[in-house]
Image (cartoon, rainbow, N blue to C red):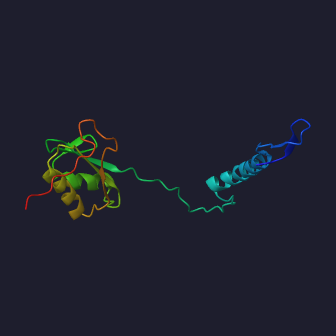
Amino acid sequence: MAFSSQHLGGGGLHRPLADINITPLVDVMLVLLIVFMVTAPMLATGLKVDLPQAKASQPVNPKEPIVVSVTSDGGIAIGTETVALNDLVPALLKLTAGDTSRVIQVRADRSAAYGAIVGVLDQLASNGLVHIALISDPKPRADAPAGAKLAAPAP
């Protein structure tokens, strides 16, 4: 706080002036704003470099994942095409042209039998299709209790 004495009339009484001088604060804030405005674009894009050209270079095409769905009644589908459990791996290998590095997303209905889901995962993993992702819904459901816990197994 800045204190200065002011005369109150002619009696010699002094009263402190309690005003905050915000000019240095504004100066510091403006300097910080300029620093962030200069450095933010460099952090987002990295350094500017002149890349060399190569004749044999190929653009990287990320492969779309294959979606395998398990319905509530145990049905299995690749995309929208329904397949039997025994025909799942040959259909996937035909679809991927034998590429076992493709990501396979398994989407199962929440009321699907656990055994049906494990059967699909077992078929995939035992045939070399090990890049498997289990898909879930990130949004909480209204019918599920917020703090629901799994019941402990009976001894």
Q: State the count of labels.
A: 0
**Residue 146 coordinates in the image, percent (x, y):** 28, 43
Decide which of 31, 38 is in the foreground and name it: 31
Question: At 67% across and 55% down in the image, what residue appears?
Answer: 42
- Give above or below for 103 relative to 77: below
Instruction: Answer left or right for 77 relative to 153.
Output: right
Instruction: Answer left or right for 92 relative to 21.
Output: left
Quadrant housing residue 79: top left
Decide which of 34, 114 is in the foreground and name it: 34
Decide which of 130, 118 is in the foreground and name it: 118
Question: At 13% across and 41% down in the image, what residue appears?
Answer: 73
In the rendered image, the residue lying farthest to the right is 10
Question: At 19% across and 60% down in the image, what residue appears?
Answer: 122
Question: At 20% across and 52% down in the image, what residue appears?
Answer: 88
Instruction: Answer left or right for 107 relative to 51.
Output: left
**Residue 115 coordinates in the image, percent (x, y):** 13, 53
Image quarter (top left, top right, bottom left or bottom right) of the C terminus: bottom left
Quadrant housing residue 137: top left
In the rendered image, the residue lying farthest to the front is 11
- Give above or below for 61 relative to 79: below
**Residue 114 coordinates in the image, percent (x, y):** 15, 51
